[in-house]
Amino acid sequence: MHAFWRSLARNRLAIAGGVVVVCLVAAALLAPALAPWDPHRPSIKQALAAPSAAHPLGTDQLGRDVLSRMLYGARVSLAVGFVSVGIATIVGLILGSLAGYHGGTVDAVVMRFVDLMLVFPSFFLLLAVLAFLRPSIWTIMAVIGLTSWMRVARLVRAEFLTLKEREFVIWSHAIGASTLRIIWRHILPNAIAPVLVAMTLGIPAAILTESGLSFLGLGVQPPHASWGNILNEGKDAIEIAWWLSFYPGLAILVTVLSYNLLGEGIRDALDPRLRQRGR
Amino acid sequence: MAVLLCAAVVAGCSNDLDGAEVPGGGAPAKRAYGDTLIEALLADVSGLIPNILSDSPSYEVGGLIYNGLVGFDRDLNLVGELAESWSFSTDCLDLTFTLRPNATWHDGRPFTADDVLFTYETMVHPKTPTSNRESFKVIERVDVVGPRTVHIRYSKPYAKALQSWGLSVLPRHVLEPYVRDGKLREAPQNWKDPVGTGPYRFAERRAGEKIVLVANRAYFAGPPYISRVVYRIIPSQPTIFLELKAKGVDAGRLNALQYARQTNYPAFEKAYRKYRHAGGGYTYLGFNLKDPRFADRRVRQAIAHAIDKRELIDGVLFGLGRDATGPYKPGTWAHNPNVKTYPHDLARARALLSEAGWKEKNAEGLLVKDGKPFTFELMTNQGNEERRKVAEIVQASLRDLGIGVEIRIIEWASFIKEYVKKRRFEAIVLGWGIGPDPDQYEIWHSSKTGPDDLNHISYANPEVDDRLEKGRSACVPAERVKHYHRLQEILAEDQPVVFLYFGDALPVVSSRVHGIVPGPNGIRYNFPEWYVPAALHRYTSG
């Protein structure tokens, strides 16, 4: 563990990513205190105002403050990122450990189901599902989560396949530990490292997906702001109001990049071979 | 084509009427034949025989290929097209057309009175898949009196008798077998090689890509000046705008944002001429009147008072629209300017709501009656930024009153099919495109509330029914005006929908095209007379 932190601390990009992520989470949590204006109240006379002291990031087509909307949008993006990755991780852990631990028929069935899910281009699967459901932040979290657990399931299964043959697992069997206890207390803690990396890398993917859906109008519904739908509104006015496209685009870019840097840093730090090379 | 459900995209189906403004003015130049005009179409045509179609691209293209017996001029007066003259008996039952002597079909055969009879037979044939049958069912019989004379006998006076003959006249010698078998939609003329009498003839079509028309040199009113018209199918308003700026198309429509803020630079103003005239469609906030909350007129009136129409017109249309007080466009003959209006007045709105029993507020500031808070879902279609903005402004305005609104935006086809037609909505933001005639029986009559009918809001008012029936059967204009003026008074009082605004139509045409004279009928009514002076020709063509 100590080696992990030392290795992570030496990776400057990962640290930068981590700092940005922490700042974003803080900004999202403190949005009501930080936002200078009501993010939902139209003010037609202020429509499409350029960035100024009163509106540091300008206003949108209905005269709402872009900074305030972006702060509230950060809540949506981060919430979608965390919750949907949480759902994906839980589903992936359960199915992956079932398949890996039991092997045989269970493994075959679960893995074919994983293949089946991977066959669908996930974005189109999302679009199809959302056409039937009422779009809201909850359905989006659920749908993204339930269409992105396959990677975790595969990782967990692979870890289980090797771990279940190890001596400590065999000994646990020998002294009569229950299956659940073996999975929960002995194998899972050893399999968690790659899952942690997958989670960190899954969050930016979920944020991007949510932005894409909101851009297409299938994400969070108006008047609620998300970076994707601010960007969508901005595209019609891109020539006269660059701030409507630039800032949400920048926010998405920085967030996704930070998570990826952090995720890669964690991955490298967890990998003993890379750690050695680093030394 | 009395009413069109105004479709997804901005100005998708405006009928371009009334009061025009021309920025600048064309200097007179010598008329010349030649050049090509490239137009943008938002969707491919669904066919080439407009009589059996109902989408606006098909009507736009079909309008150049076919003629009606009559048409509308610049000021929306009825004028003869294939008909040279007509006489209408004083009891409004006998209509006699005298046809032009020199009109021919695109295949060279002469146009005769028999083709008019054939068009009538087509429209009333039970197997013809058309939504325009109503206007022809009131006809008792059609007689061919001579090769150039047709007599039509109506079974009862019908207000739209004359203008109903504006529909495309079809050739008997080409289409008769298809009509007989009920296969007009499958006829080859519906997808290539249509035969009409109009100023342009069909040249080429690539599905989903383009339609090319060439000038009909034998056109009875003289050949059109522009030699070729190419319709490019570009199914996205922003792409059309980019194409306009890149000069990939010569004509198109702007939205309010583009007109007001994105086209005011010298290069654009030099290359194009922008027009602005009152559009033929209005946007409304409609309620499902089966919902007991909205069945109470005071609630609807309160909502009308809470919405600042000026804010809507400025915010959504950049001022390029007019306040709607009813379903008729200001300035047209049926419009009644003296009806009840609903100025922005929150105090009045609150008083009306409390009269209706919405007095208390809960912890979230929402009005409560019988323990239930006043919240409803407001639906509109996807892809129409204008309506989305209207919904958001309405949402914020009603929040001040203590009414919670949840917005739901749904893709156009399923919005209409699953929600509007099945009446599965609480409130909607939608638009109606209206024709030049004030008959709106289909929209407001209480008998028109079936799944495929257009009275989506389930409005029923016996006096409205009565006025609508009388208005469409009276044939003296002065009498019709009386009925329609009263109709507007009732609708204004009742507010079955909150009439929001008429958006202006904002067409734009390359400045090399001359001869455009905007009027109440928009700009396209005299298309064959548009020309490009020889020095300005951009494309060579035969």
Image (cartoon, coloured by chain):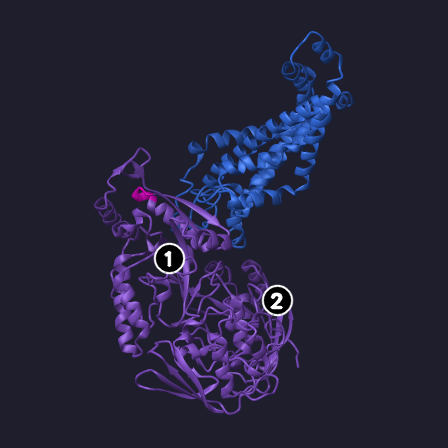
Q: Give the residue displayed 50% in from the left and 73% down from the top.
A: B51
Q: Chain of mark 2?
A: B
* The residue positioned farthest toward the top in the image shown: A175
Q: Residue at x 68, y 21 (%)?
A: A191
Q: Main secondary structure of the magenta part?
A: helix
- Establish if B394 lies above or below B443: above
Q: Nearer the viewer, residue B275 or B380?
A: B380
Query: Chain coloured purple: which letter?
Result: B
Residue A266 visible at all:
no
Q: Name the disc covering residue B248, or none.
A: 2
Quadrant of the image for the N terminus of chain B?
A: bottom left
Tag 1: Cα neighbours inside 10 Å, few (<14), some, or many (≥20)? many
Q: Position of residue B311 (x, y in %)?
A: 36, 54
Q: Give the letter of the blue chain.
A: A
Q: Quadrant of residue B209?
A: bottom right
Element type where label 1 sits in the image: strand
The boundaries of the magenta stretch are: B399-403
Residue position marked by numbered label 1 in the rendering: B284
For numbered disc 2, what is the local secondary structure? loop
Q: Does B402 sit left or right of B503 as displayed?
A: left
User: Which badge, 1 or 2, is on the more N-terminal residue?
Assistant: 2
The residue closer to the viewer here, B404 or A96, is A96
Q: Amino acid at mark 2?
A: Gly
Count of marks, rendered view? 2
